[in-house]
């Protein structure tokens, strides 16, 4: 079967890898280079066992501070955009305990599958991507926040996650670079099995290997729409001409909503704008972290990728504005100084922004939709967990195509 994958981010490339392994003829289309969108400078964490959705009951009590504080990690800038309002109302409706539990269970199952498939990709491709498996600490600054984390930990434990609450002293024993921050935290959730890697390098390695195996890459091609015939998509219309295929997979991130609408599918996918910096670290022992760290209060993540430290955070509902305000980058630099004052001189920050495609609940859209043509599958809406969930999502797409062919 000839399958056309729309999108060369980590989700699209993982899909192409899965399909090529199964013997399909694959074409990948994107307007930019692999990983140039939300994949390029993401948080680098592979968070397989800690997947608490953003839509959580705790959002309600945090909402005034999150929306009104100029330094808030969550920012809302109302647009004349019906999708933003519809998405926002659906997000608030999802901020309840039952939805959060259900979402957590589904995300953990998908993440477990993704870990297995990522490891299969590593064995197959052997990517040079600064991979590490040093675990993860999620830090909490108040007893109330830590108790909330304990409840989430207990929920995730019933679903197979292996985690534990650790004291500030244990945090420092696990990650000595946190020594100067000991007095600012009351504890943390420690997950020994979590990993990290440079997602952009994974994207580049996948393209290199897949190209050598015969996968066709059409880069620099804008997708304009679709040609339909007998209830199916016959071709995708692009700036370089129509591309025909037997089946199509839409993995276009935050651009998926507009193109989905063109074929009758409502995709509740809206961009959550995030930022990152990437800095060279001091190689001295204990200066920079080797364990993944998430500061829950600041909603900032730290991941070691080789000789660099990736610092990422924020979630802004501001449309498709790709500007990088200096204040946001300064916030990330300040967080780095606060937690890891000896980690880096912060001389070159390499600022980045990306539009993480999110659904209101946090669950990605994978597979067919009843209102869309039967040969169009969707793989989008992964939010901040795109890297984590990419290979499991790709496996499910491959299985859906196999079922259709049998």
Image: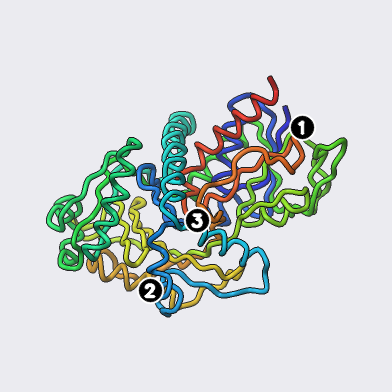
Looking at this rendering, what residue extends furthest in the left direction? 169
Q: Earlier in the sequence, mark 3 or mark 2?
A: 3
Up-down: is 30 above or below 246? below
Q: Are marks 1 and 2 in contact (CB under 8 Å)?
A: no
Q: Are marks 3 and 1 in contact (CB under 8 Å)?
A: no
In front: 105, or 18?
105
Residue 287 x, y percent position in the rendering: 21, 60
Q: Earlier in the sequence, mark 3 or mark 1?
A: 3
Q: Are marks 3 and 2 in contact (CB under 8 Å)?
A: no
Q: Quadrant of the C terminus?
A: top right
Q: Residue at x 56, y 36 (%)?
A: 394
Q: Quadrant of the N terminus?
A: top right
In front: 309, or 235?
235
For discs 3 and 2, the disc positioned in front in the rendered view? 3
- 278 relative to 31 in the view: left or right: left
Residue 309 x, y percent position in the rendering: 34, 58
- Mark on residue 246? 1
Residue 80 x, y percent position in the rendering: 67, 74
| Residue ID for mark 3 | 94
Q: Quadrant of residue 148?
A: bottom left
In front: 358, or 122?
358
Q: Residue at x 36, y 59 (%)?
A: 301
Q: Earlier in the sequence, mark 1 or mark 2?
A: 1
């Amino acid at each position: 079967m000839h399958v056309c994958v729309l999108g060369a981010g980590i989700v699209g490339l993982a899909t192409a890898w899965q399909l090529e392994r199964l013997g399909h003829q694959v074409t990948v289309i994107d307007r930019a280079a692999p990983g140039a969108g939300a994949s390029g400078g993401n948080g680098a964490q592979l968070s397989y066992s800690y997947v608490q959705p953003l839509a959580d009951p705790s959002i309600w009590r945090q909402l005034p501070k999150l929306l009104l504080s100029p330094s808030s990690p969550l920012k809302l800038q109302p647009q004349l955009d019906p999708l933003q309002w519809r998405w926002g109302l659906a997000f608030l409706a999802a901020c309840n305990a039952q939805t959060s539990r259900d979402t957590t269970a589904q995300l953990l199952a998908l993440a477990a599958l993704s870990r297995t498939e990522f490891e299969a990709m590593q064995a197959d491709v052997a990517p040079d991507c600064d991979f590490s498996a040093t675990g993860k600490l999620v830090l909490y600054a108040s007893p109330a926040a830590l108790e909330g984390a304990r409840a989430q930990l207990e929920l995730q434990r019933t679903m197979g996650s292996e985690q534990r609450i650790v004291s500030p002293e244990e945090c420092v024993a696990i990650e000595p670079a946190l020594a100067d921050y000991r007095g600012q935290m009351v504890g943390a959730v420690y997950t020994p099995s979590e990993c990290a890697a440079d997602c952009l390098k994974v994207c580049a390695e996948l393209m290199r290997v897949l190209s050598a195996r015969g996968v066709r890459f059409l880069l620099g091609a804008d997708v304009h729409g679709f040609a339909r015939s007998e209830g199916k998509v016959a071709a995708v219309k692009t700036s370089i001409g129509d591309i025909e295929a037997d089946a199509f997979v839409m993995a276009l991130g935050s651009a998926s909503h507009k193109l989905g609408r063109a074929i009758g599918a409502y995709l509740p996918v809206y961009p959550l704008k995030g930022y990152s910096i990437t800095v060279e670290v001091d190689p001295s022992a204990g200066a920079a972290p080797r364990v993944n760290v998430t500061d829950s209060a600041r909603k900032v993540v730290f991941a070691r990728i080789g000789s660099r430290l990736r610092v990422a955070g924020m979630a802004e509902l501001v449309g498709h504005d790709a500007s990088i305000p200096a204040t946001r980058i300064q916030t990330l630099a300040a967080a780095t100084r606060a937690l890891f004052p000896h980690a880096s001189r912060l001389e070159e920050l390499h600022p980045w922004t990306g539009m993480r495609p999110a659904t209101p609940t946090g669950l990605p859209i994978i597979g067919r939709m009843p209102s869309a043509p039967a040969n169009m599958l969707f793989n989008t809406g992964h939010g901040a967990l795109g890297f984590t969930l990419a290979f499991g999502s790709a496996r499910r797409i491959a299985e859906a195509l196999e079922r259709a062919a049998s």
